Amino acid sequence: MKKPESLPQSEEIVDASNLILGRMASYVAKKALEGNRIVVLNAERAVISGTKERVVARAKQKLKTRTLGNLEKSPTHPRKPDGYVRRVIRGMLPWKKPSGKQAFHRVKVYIGTPDEYRDRPGKTIEGAESSKLRVPYITVARLSEEIGGFVSE
């Protein structure tokens, strides 16, 4: 059975402030696969659970992954908060299928709030608030600073 050609194109704005990154990313990925355009604001304020040392060590380990034969073919790892969040969302999509690539192109991630979205309120995702966490956590902005990304505030 073929999928319908025209998918619903409603736009949804998600404010990532104080949201758990993985839960927020899975919500965004699911909505993008359904055909919605998703805009994620304040990506640098999303949180990752775990101690600072552990989260930073894992991120730095990923940065060491490369291809020794040809460095141009090595995987690129984002260091800025918006790129980091986009990469997490991409990991939750079926990237090797056309539907996953199309869904990924419907997702926009911003550091802070751009002028065109200032007057429109961002949605928070129920069940993804960082207030639920009983363990230490680190923000994406702090992680980005630790791995060498530049965060302009």
Image (cartoon, helix red, strand yellow):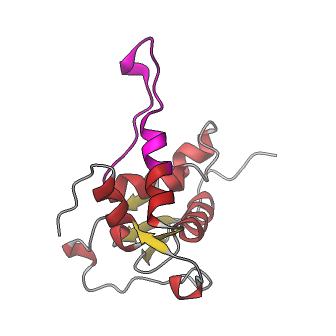
At which x and y percent is residue 106?
Answer: 46, 56
The foreground one among 136 and 110 is 136
Magenta-colored segment: predominant secondary structure: loop
Left or right of residue 118, residue 102 in this image: right
Viewport quadrant of the C terminus: bottom left
Residue at x-position 75% and y-position 45%: 2
Among the 4 quarters of the image, the one containing residue 141:
bottom left
Q: Is 8 within the magenta?
A: no
Query: Count of labels shown?
Result: 0
Magenta range: 58-80
Left or right of residue 142, residue 128 in this image: right
Instruction: From this view, report whether residue 8 is shown above or below residue 63.
Output: below
| Residue found at the far right of this picture | 1
Left or right of residue 143, residue 87 in this image: right
Residue at x-position 26% and y-position 86%: 119
The foreground one among 3 and 29 is 29
The foreground one among 28 and 128 is 128
At which x and y percent is residue 85?
Answer: 43, 58
At which x and y percent is residue 38?
Answer: 46, 66
